[in-house]
Amino acid sequence: MRDSAEEEKIRDEEDFVKVRKKVLDLAGVNNLEILDIGAGPLSAIAAKYYSCSVTSVDIDRKELRLWKEYAEKEGVSDRISFEEEDAADLYYCDDAFDVCISFCALHHFPIKIRDQALSEFRRVSSKRFIIVEYTEEGFSEVHSREDFEPVNLKKLEENLKETGITRVIPVDKMMVYVVDKKAQ
């Protein structure tokens, strides 16, 4: 018999995976090559459930090690490359990935480099890029005691609409922006 704390932990873990799977469904990533901005569980979920090949980048080596261990535990480390990269100055060539996904990572960037990071996401993705960010309510729940600045979602949406056809989908206490690249 499980206690209520254990049951709550299991529900939280299921929600953790469920919300990321919903984003990956919206992104249409089956069998695609993905760039995951900000190392986290999304890369393992994409590899495990969507047969994706994933490159997960982060500027923090500790995060890269942590999520590499998670991928090994999930049995998908052979489909994920973990690389130390600055998302505002990516090493990759234009259109190197089918899809670029930033799942609740943009608010970790200093405000002054966020636009440059968006330009890089746009540059390295050939089909589309996806930005997921917290609403004000979601941000205050997750980062109320940390020194991060929330993303101005209205400004973000305006910026993204200049790039391509943007779908904006609310998911829990987050907004998902799917930007299909304009035909060149």
Image (spheres, rainbow, N blue to C red):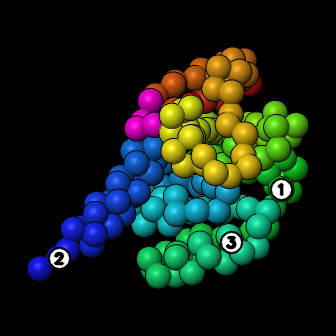
Which residue type carries mark 3? Leu
- Residue 121 location in percent, x, y? 73, 42
Q: SS of the residue at dot 2?
A: loop
Q: Quadrant of the N terminus?
A: bottom left
Task: For residue 34, say whether it is visible.
Answer: yes
In the displayed orientation, state which residue is furthest to the front.
145
Q: Which residue is mark 3?
A: 64
Q: SS of the residue at dot 3?
A: helix
Which quadrant of the structure image shows residue 78?
A: bottom right
> Could you give the CA–CA distance between mark 1 and mark 2, rounded to whole angstroms?
43 Å
Q: Residue at x 33, y 67 (%)?
A: 9
> Could you give the CA–CA distance between mark 3 and mark 2, rounded to whole angstroms?
33 Å
Comes first in the chain, label 1 or label 2: 2
Which residue type carries mark 2? Arg
- Residue 18 location in percent, x, y? 35, 52
Q: Quadrant of the C terminus?
A: top right
Q: SS of the residue at dot 1?
A: loop
Q: Badges 1 and 2: C-beta atoms under 8 Å apart?
A: no
Q: Badges 1 and 3: C-beta atoms under 8 Å apart?
A: no
Q: Residue at x 71, y 21 (%)?
A: 155
Q: Which stretch is magenta?
A: 170-174
Nearest to the observer: residue 150 or residue 67: 150
> Could you give the CA–CA distance between mark 1 and mark 3, rounded to whole angstroms?
13 Å
Mark 1 Cα-neighbour bin, 10 Å: few <14, some 14–19, many ≥20: some
Comes first in the chain, label 3 or label 2: 2
- Residue 103 location in percent, x, y? 58, 48
Relative horizontal placement of residue 9, taking residue 92 as reference (left or right): left
Which quadrant of the structure image shows residue 83?
A: bottom right
Q: Is residue 172 magenta?
A: yes
Q: Which residue is mark 1?
A: 86
Q: Which residue is mark 2?
A: 2
